[in-house]
Image (spheres, rainbow, N blue to C red):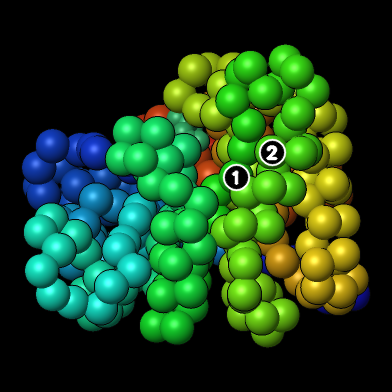
Amino acid sequence: MAARVPFIAGNWKMNPTSVEEAISLAKAIADGKGSSKAQVAICTPHPFLAACKPHLDKGGIDLGAQACYFEQKGAYTGATSTSMIRSVGAKHVIVGHSERRTVFHQTDEMVNQIIHKVLADNMLPILCVGETKEEYESGLNTQICAIQLAKGLKGVSKEDAKKVTIAYEPVWAIGTGLVCDASVAQDVHKFIRGWLANMYDQETADTIRIQYGGSVTPDSVDELMSKPDIDGCLVGGASLDPAKFTRIMNFK
Ligand code: PEP
C-alpha cells in the first residue's frame, strides 16, 4: 500500500475582514510552511481567493474554497460555481461543512450534488461528516458518519472517490476548544476507512485521506497525527494564527 501524504487544510471561515489582512495572513502562512511533510491547503473566503493565490503559491500551499453551488451558471443570486473558483486557481473545495449544513440549511442531497459537480469540474472535494453532541452522547457517532457518507458519496465512482478527502468533524468539537480524544477519533477514522472498503474496495479505502477537524491546536496535532488512520487535519480557528498554523503544518 502506498503511504498516504498527510494533508493539512486551513478553513478561514468568514475571516479576516479585508483583502489586505487576507494577503498578510497568506504571506505569513506561506513563510511558515518550511519543510513540512504535509500537503497544505488554505480555504479562503471567495473574495480573497485570487489575491491570496500568488502568496500561497510561494510557500507551495494549495488554494481551496469553502463552498460552492452545484449549478454551472445562471439565476442563482449570491452563489459561486466551481468554474469561477477554479478560474482563480482554487484546487480544493470544502463540501458539507457543518456550518453550511446548519446555518445555510444544506441537505445531504445538496452535498451529494456539489460533490458530483466539484469532481466533474476536476477539483478536489473535502467532504465533511460528523455527529452532533447529542448524537455523540447517544453513541451514534459512527452511524451518523455512515449515513452522511452514503448520502454524500451516492453515485460517486471508485476512481472519483479516490480524489475525495473525508474530514471527520464532530460538530461538538468545532470552534468549541473541545478536541475529540485522539484514540476516539482514530476509532471513528478506522470505521470510516472500513466503510469505504465496503462501499468500494480496500485499495480505494487505503488511498482516500481522512482528516480530523475540531479545535485542532499545536497541543493536540502531534498525538492526532500519530494515529494510523488520521491522515491530516482540517483546521478552523488556529489557521487564522500564523504561529499556531505553522506548528500544526510542521507536526511531529
Ligand atoms: C472547521 O472549521 O472545520 C474547524 C474544525 O474549526 P475549528 O478548528 O475552529 O474547530
Residue at mark 2: C-beta within 8 A of ligand 1: no
Residue at 45% over, 24% down:
175
Quadrant that contains the N terminus: bottom right
Residue at mark 1: C-beta within 8 A of ligand 1: no
Which badge, 1 or 2, is on the more N-terminal residue?
Answer: 1
- Which numbered disc, 1 or 2, marks the residue closer to the eye? 2
Q: Position of residue 65 (x, y in %)?
A: 33, 59
> Closer to the camera, 139 or 183?
139
> Closer to the camera, 184 or 151?
151
Q: Which residue is mark 1?
A: 129
Q: Which residue is mark 2?
A: 144
Vertical side of 72 occupied by 32: above or below: above
Q: What amino acid type should be assigned to the residue bearing mark 2?
A: Ile
Discs 1, 2 touching: Cβ within 8 Å = yes
Quick check: 20 left or right of 207?
left
Q: Position of residue 99 (x, y in %)?
A: 39, 36
Quick check: 32 left or right of 214?
left
Secondary structure of residue under mark 1: strand
Q: What amino acid type should be assigned to the residue bearing mark 1?
A: Val
Q: Quadrant of residue 168?
A: top right
